[in-house]
Amino acid sequence: MKITNTVETLRAVDIELVAKIHATCFYDAWGPSMIRQVLDMPGTFALIVRRKNYSSIIGFALARIVADECELLSLGVESEYRANGAGSLLLTATMARATLERARWFFLEVAEDNDVALRLYRAHGLARVGYRLNYYDNADGTKTNALTMRCQLPE
Ligand SMILES: CC(C)(COP(=O)(O)OP(=O)(O)OC[C@H]1O[C@@H](n2cnc3c(N)ncnc32)[C@H](O)[C@@H]1OP(=O)(O)O)[C@@H](O)C(=O)NCCC(=O)NCCS
């Protein structure tokens, strides 16, 4: 049986699940109340990927539109479901939503050693525009630099 993934807008009832996935993706985990706070900011939206035949949530994207710019705030897919197109689906849907809401630019920050994410972002037309020294904290107390990436959205 082929399992297809579907993208939906995050519902309040699913915030706890998204927080659980976030904690498996990032050292600096966002709990449910942090996610609610982010969603309360004007211009913010969140999408989730659901495995259609099983209905479980396997990934999320949080983004915020301010003026003509959309920033990808966070993107994550549960580790056992990665490399199967869910991240790409979420990014495509987030960019489409931003375009629909008349954003002209799409940007994000990413750890400079996150090869999988960098590959995903480049494949979607994002290019490096900046550099942030010691931007992310790591579990071992070290820090990782970030790249800022940007692309223009279609008219
Ligand atoms: C980055 C992330 C969201 C990608 O999600 P995903 O569902 O694996 O993405 P996709 O399946 O759409 O794959 C995207 C690309 O990465 C490649 N890829 C995915 N996992 C990979 C792996 N473990 N090794 C090598 N390449 C991999 C895919 O082949 C694909 O490249 P392609 O289009 O050239 O084939 C996911 O790895 C993740 O949640 N990582 C932890 C959190 C994170 O780093 N988020 C981004 C922070 S800015």
Image (cartoon, grey):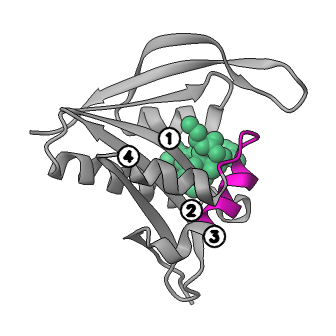
Q: Residue 98 location, x and y as percent?
A: 25, 47
Camera-nearest label, 3 or 1: 3
Q: CA distance from mark 2 to mark 4?
A: 21 Å
Residue occupying the point 56% across, 62% down: 59
Q: Is mark 1 within 8 Å of ligand 1?
A: yes
N-terminal of the pair, mark 3 or mark 1, is 3
The amino acid on which the numbered mark 1 sits, given as a three-letter code, is Leu
Who is closer to the viewer here, 1 or 101?
101
* Residue 117 falls in image quadrant: top right
18 part of magenta stretch: yes
Q: Which residue matches tag 4?
A: 41
The amino acid on which the numbered mark 3 sits, given as a three-letter code, is Leu
Q: Residue 149 location, x and y as percent?
A: 42, 24
Q: Which residue matches tag 2?
A: 59
Q: CA distance from mark 1 to mark 4?
A: 27 Å
In the rendered view, tell whether residue 105 sits above or below residue 127.
below
Task: Return the mark for residue 17.
Answer: 3
N-terminal of the pair, mark 2 or mark 1, is 2
Q: CA distance from mark 2 to mark 1?
A: 15 Å
Say if mark 4 contacts mark 3, CB within 8 Å.
no
Q: Is mark 2 within 8 Å of ligand 1?
A: yes
N-terminal of the pair, mark 3 or mark 2, is 3
The amino acid on which the numbered mark 2 sits, given as a three-letter code, is Gly
Camera-nearest label, 3 or 2: 3
